[in-house]
Amino acid sequence: DVLEFDGNHVDFRSMHARTWSGEEVELTATETKLLKLLAAHAGTVVSRKIVVEHLFGSTAPLTVRTLDNVVLHLRKLLERDSGAPQHIHTVRGLGFRFEA
């Protein structure tokens, strides 16, 4: 229930994180579920379809931007440089990959 990488400490139960910069942040339920899913499959690509179904259900109306915004916010919180992410990668045309 805890994920540690690159100075980040994420507690999935409490949905809180201490970032590499020492900031204490609260994650949304969606951010927590996404990070937990990607970390459980670290090093492998998780398809956008699987991510969407896991986070929102198979019948939820969802725009592509909704998921992209969740990923972007996680990067802003946990990446040292959100413009050049080292941990939460988008694999164009496929999905996402987490690297600790």
Image (cartoon, grey):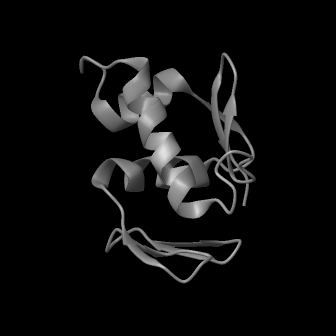
Identify the residue at horizontal 50%, vertical 48% (top origin).
Answer: 37
State the image quarter where residue 17 is shown.
bottom left
Q: Is residue 77 left or right of residue 30?
A: right
State the image quarter where residue 65 is shown.
top left
Q: Is residue 36 left or right of residue 99?
A: left
Locate the N terminus by quadrant.
bottom left
Q: Is residue 46 left or right of residue 68?
A: right
Residue 24: % across, % down = 42, 79
Q: Residue furthest left?
A: 60
Q: Is residue 20 left or right of residue 58?
A: right
Residue 42: % across, % down = 68, 50
State the image quarter where residue 60 is shown.
top left
Identify the residue at horizontal 65%, vertical 20% (top origin).
Answer: 94
Q: Is residue 63 above or below residue 37?
A: above
Residue 81: % across, % down = 69, 56
Q: Is residue 8 above or below residue 47?
A: below
Q: Residue furthest bottom?
A: 22
Residue 54: % across, % down = 38, 35
